[in-house]
Image: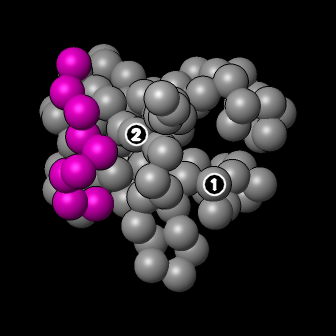
Amino acid sequence: MTAPVRVQLPASLSALAGTARELDLSVVLPVTQRTILDALELAYPMLRGTLRDQTSQRRRPFIRFFACQQDLSHEAPDAPVPADVASGSEIFMIVGAIAGG
């Protein structure tokens, strides 16, 4: 079974994928960060390696995940995302963090 999930990409990654910034994906249940990224990389293989390391599957240091006004970046990859994201009513945002001084 799958769930309809809305994902928002940063401008740089939507340009790389050649797509709109907001995407509709069909994600395998249960909906987790891992299943969202799996669906995203399956639909847009050019994004493989940009969001997470392909060997360790760990999130890249300057990539953050947000949903329902929460920073989900440090949640376990297999933890369920908020129900509103899994139902498609809220968006799962992928954000490129900015560092500097």
Q: Nearer the viewer, residue 55 or 79?
A: 55
Q: Quadrant of the N terminus?
A: bottom left
- The residue carrying mark 1 is 50
User: Which residues are drawn in magenta?
Assistant: 69-77
7 shown above or below 2:
above
Give me the residue at 69% from left, 52% from top: 47
Which percent across, then down, holds residue 20?
71, 22
Q: For the residue labelled by badge 1, is the local secondary structure a helix, a strand or a loop?
A: loop
Q: Quadrant of residue 3?
A: top left
Q: Secondary structure at mark 2?
A: strand
Residue at position x 49%, y 57% in the image: 60
What's under tag 2, amino acid-wise? Arg
Res. 71 image quadrant: top left
Above or below residue 35? Residue 72 is above
User: Horizontal and vertical percent for residue 67?
Assistant: 28, 27
Q: Residues within 10 Å of mark 1 (few under 14, many from 20)?
A: some
Q: Which residue is mark 2?
A: 64
Q: Earlier in the sequence, mark 2 or mark 1?
A: 1
60 relative to 43 in the view: left or right: left
Left or right of residue 41: residue 71:
left
Distance between mark 2 and mark 1 Cα atoms: 12 Å
Q: Residue at x 55, y 53 (%)?
A: 51
Please report the residue visible at 72 percent of the width from the left and 31 percent of the height from the top.
12
Query: In front: 43, or 49?
Result: 49
* Disc 2 and disc 1 in contact, CB within 8 angstroms: no
Q: Name the amino acid, label 1.
A: Thr
